Image (cartoon, helix red, strand yellow):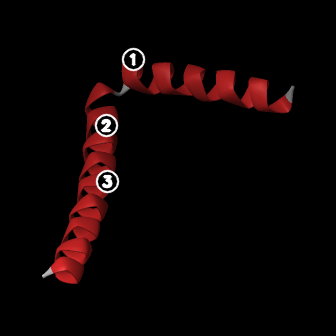
Amino acid sequence: MVKKVLTWAGIAFLIFFVAYRPNSAADVFKSLGGGVMDIAQGFGDFFTSLVA
């Protein structure tokens, strides 16, 4: 039950954040995407080093 409430609260906050602060929301998602790309690049470099 708690997980369901927290999930819906998170979705509501996300919608509120995007609706009232679209530029800030875009910056947050850009930085998260950049972090994911950095991690993926690190894994790629690691496995390339293992093979080479």
Q: Residue at x 19, y 78 (%)?
A: 51
The tag earlier along the polypeptide, 1 or 2, is 1
Q: Disc number at residue 24?
A: 2
**Mark toward the viewer: 2 or 3:** 3
Name the foreground residue: 46 vs 36: 46
Dot 1 lies on which element?
helix
Give me the C-alpha separation between circle 1 and circle 2.
Answer: 10 Å
The residue that mark 1 highlights is 19
Note whether 6 is above or below 38 in the view shown. above
Dot 3 lies on which element?
helix
Name the foreground residue: 43 vs 48: 48
Q: Amino acid at mark 2?
A: Ser
Dot 2 lies on which element?
helix
The tag earlier along the polypeptide, 2 or 3, is 2
Residue 22 is situated, as x and y percent measured from the top left of the image, at 30, 26
Note whether 49 is above or below 32 in the view shown. below
Note whether 17 is above or below 47 in the view shown. above
The residue that mark 3 highlights is 36
Q: Amino acid at mark 3?
A: Val
How packed is label 2: few (under 14 Cα within 10 Å), some, or many (20 or more)? few
Q: Amino acid at mark 1?
A: Ala
Residue 11 is situated, as x and y percent measured from the top left of the image, at 57, 23
> Is residue 25 left or right of 13 when viewed as pictured?
left
Give me the C-alpha separation between circle 2 and circle 3.
Answer: 19 Å
